[in-house]
Image: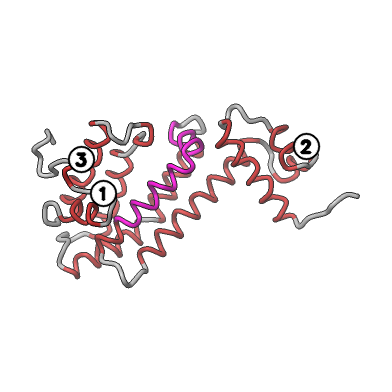
Amino acid sequence: MRVTKDPEIRRKELMDAAEKLFLEHGYEETAVSDIVKKTGVAQGTFYYYFKSKEAILDAITDKYLDILIERMENIANQENLTAIEKLLAIFEFTSSFTGDHKGIMDYIEEGRCAHLQIKFNQRISSETIKPTARIIQQGIEEGVFNTKYPEEASRAYMGVTALILQGVNDLDLNSPEFMRRFMALFYYIERILGTESGAIINTFCEKGFYKSSSQIGDINGNNGL
């Protein structure tokens, strides 16, 4: 007996199946036939919802962006966190999220689907500026950040973070290059936000990311920065 499902449920099933296959085998190695087989539908059903394999990746990318942006908004609105704690909460979430979805994120980041990379970068840059700017304004009011331009500082913060951490998921967590990236990131973020040297990295360590700041290194420039 043929089972008829709500279109949104069927669409979600196809997306979930595709996402699992992309993460397990890679985007290039996954065929539409693999997706329909995993979902248990006819190939024509797939093309009813998505024009191509690239179209379903496009939909998955939108889902990722919605999750990232919604989470950033939620963190920015939390009243029990300081501005620095909010920035680190966003950092922790985005790091774990991109790590959990590494295969697909790498594909987007590497630019093999140029329009997806453009979409990802444009939405991230345009829709995360305001929540980050609100956090920076909170930091100014708390007396820990010192900048006259919170929105522009937000743009600089997002841009520097994206550039410095590009490809970081491919690095060994204990490698000198990995440590150097994080030292550089905190070094430049502190200067963008006009905060006291070490303020962000010390909170980073206190929250349990690393056991001590010595595992990251001296952010004041004694490691060649």
Which residue is drawn at the image coordinates 51% and 37% (left, top)? 104
Asked if the magenta segment contains residue 213, the reply would be no
Sequence-wise, the earlier of marks 2 and 3 is 2
Q: Which residues are magenta?
A: 88-110
Callout 2 secondary element: helix
Question: Where in the figure is residue 150, as x and y percent of width and height?
Answer: 24, 60
Which residue is drawn at the image coordinates 49% and 29% (left, top)? 112
Mark number displayed over residue 43: 2
Kindly report the secondary structure that dominates the magenta region of the rendered protein: helix
Residue topped by disc 1 = 156
Residues 116 and 202: in front is: 202
Name the colour scheme: secondary structure
Left or right: 213 with respect to 18?
Answer: left
Q: Is residue 133 above or below residue 97?
A: below
Sequence-wise, the earlier of marks 3 and 1 is 1
Sequence-wise, the earlier of marks 2 and 1 is 2
Q: Is residue 186 above or below residue 154?
A: above
Which residue is drawn at the image coordinates 34% and 36% (left, top)? 168
Residue topped by disc 3 = 184
Disc 3 residue type (three-letter): Ala
- Packing grade of label 1 (10 A; few <14, some 14-19, many >=20) is some
Give the residue at the far top of this rendering: 29
